[in-house]
Every structure is written in C-alpha cells, then in structure tokens.
Image: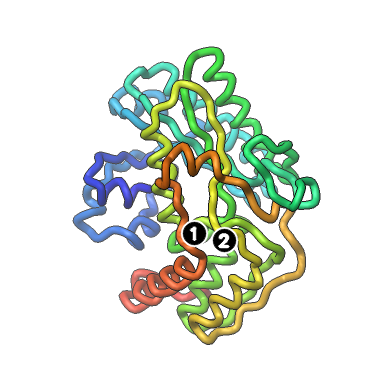
Amino acid sequence: MVAQLVKEGIRVTAYDLSKDDSRLRLLLDEAELAKVEKSTGDIRDKDAFAELVADGQFTHIIHLAGLQVPFCVANPTLGSEVNVTGTVNVLEAVRRNESVRGLTYASSVAVFGSAEMYEGGVAHDDSALLPATLYGTYKQANEGSARVFANDWGVGSIGLRPCIVYGPGRDQGLTSDVTKSMLAAAAGQPSHIGFGGSSTFQHAEDMAKTFIESARLEVDDARIFNVPGPTVAISDIASLISEETGVEVTVADNELPLPKGVDGEALDQLLVGKSEQRPIEQGVRESIEQFRRLLTEERLSPPG
C-alpha cells in the first residue's frame, strides 16, 4: 500500500514498530523509498499515535498493524493488546481529529468458522461469525469496536476481510506458505504447503488498491466487507507453481478452519470494479517472475 501511494505521488507516512524496510525495498527504488515518511512507534502507545495523527494532518488512515495467527497463539495477551487495543487506539485518534476523512482497517476471513458451517462452504458479509482462532476472535472484536465508534461518535470506517493474500512481501502468518513456495520455486527449491482444501486468493497489489480505494470513499458509518477473488484449491496452486518452474510443490491434507470461499459482491458493487482481483494463473506467474528478478538482483535471498 505504501508503494502504491508513492507511485501515485501521494504523501504517505508509515507508522511501524520496526525500522526494517526490507519489504519496501522489494517494491521501491532508492528515489521512491526516500519519499516515504517513516515514524517508528508502537500501536499500543495511545498517546504517541494520537500525537502523530494530530500533528500530521492526515486525511486518510489505513490500519494494518497486527499480529498474525502464530504470534497470537504464542502470546495471547500481546496479541490482544496489539490487535484489539491497538485498533481502539486508531479509532480514538480518528474520533479526536476531524482532519481524518477516511479510515480503512484490516479484519480477516478468520472471523468466520470452518467451511461446513456455511452453505456450500461460502461465507457472505452477514454470515455468522464463528472464529476458530484467537486471531479471528480479535478481528471480530475490532469489527464490533468500529461499529460502536460509528454509532456513538460518528467515526466512519470500512473493515475489509482478506482471505489468502499472496505475492512479494508476504512472508509471515499461517497462510504465507503459498507465497513462500513461489519464492522457493523461483530459486529452484522444492517446498511444502502446510495446509490443503480451498480458499479465496488476493494478490498483494490488488489488495493494496482495494484498501486505498475503500479509504477514499470517506463513509460516515461502520461498514464491513468480504473481499472478492478467485476461489482455488491449494493443490491447484501447487500445480500452477510447479508448471511455471518445474519444481515440486507438495500439499498437506489438513484444511484450515475457514470457509472455502467468500461472497464479495457487495464490495465489488461499492467500488465499481476497483476491487477487481487478477486471475490466479496471472498472479502466480507474475509473483514468480518478480521473485526471479529480485533473486537475480540480490534484493532477496533464497529460502534457508
């Protein structure tokens, strides 16, 4: 998202606990990187974030700060502090700063339960929220917090529920195995994806544009949407990677406790084509091509 905004010529500040810019360097050259304003801070620090928002005169905020499934399992208290309290801190900062006109935040498909809980295995925007993980539970809490901030104080927001996001830069989290296999294959190494079944996929660049365009809607209520995308079997993803590279990719039998797919029609209608996700064949091919280039340029190291 930072890279997309820089390429659009938009002033962007990245607020992050880490000073590591290795992911940005996969997407931006030195001149572009110099345009990114960086602020180091912890989303749990309410006062520090509020001060940043008050001083920066920001018009839009895209809130992505969070700890993914493995980190929430390892430290549930920290996961709650970052994912839940951190989101409340963002909402509170927006409440106190009228200059912020648009807010988008990341929820997740993890707010839903496993596929057998939904007709045809597909979750709709208003389907029952039955998270099977702490991460999903924290995301469900965020959707509730956003709704209360809208009802009580008029803080508008759009929450988006990505499924499996893939592409360069996706190197952490439970579902990052798919992208890690693309990188391994680009380096000529066999790999294993630790889950099977089917899921909906979104390329990172497409997902970035969807978040940005959602923030620009500048709504005055709390809305939450599933994100559309191609629904594909994990075994088919492995086959696409192998066909593109000639490298073996194996897949585990166990399925994730998530729907097989989601209905993202409402978001499609709202953004009028600006939430369009590329076909999975194109996304896999382009990701592997980008990984090959990054490896050749030594801007990325092979796995291991």
**Mark nearer the N terminus (1 vs 2):** 1
Name the residue: 43% across, 40% down. 271
Q: Secondary structure at mark 2?
A: helix
| Three-letter amino acid code at the position of disc 2 | Ser
Please state which of residues 119 and 59 is positioned toward the viewer in this rendering.
119
| Three-letter amino acid code at the position of disc 1 | Arg
Q: Quadrant of residue 229?
A: bottom right
The percent coordinates of residue 272 (x first, y second) are: 42, 42
Q: 225 left or right of 261?
A: left
Please state which of residues 260 and 104 is positioned toward the viewer in this rendering.
260
Whether residues under marks 1 and 2 lie with C-beta atoms below 8 angstroms apart, the answer is yes
Q: Secondary structure at mark 1?
A: loop
Please state which of residues 270 and 94 is positioned toward the viewer in this rendering.
270
Considering every residue shown, the one lying at the far top of the view is: 152
Circle on res. 131: none
The percent coordinates of residue 127 (x first, y second) are: 70, 38
Name the residue: 79% across, 46% down. 117
The percent coordinates of residue 54 (x first, y second) are: 33, 22
Residue 48 is at least partly visible in this image: no
Circle on res. 170: 1
Residue 91 is at least partly visible in this image: yes
The percent coordinates of residue 157 (x first, y second) are: 48, 28
Q: Is residue 93 above or below residue 283?
A: above
Name the residue: 32% across, 52% down. 3
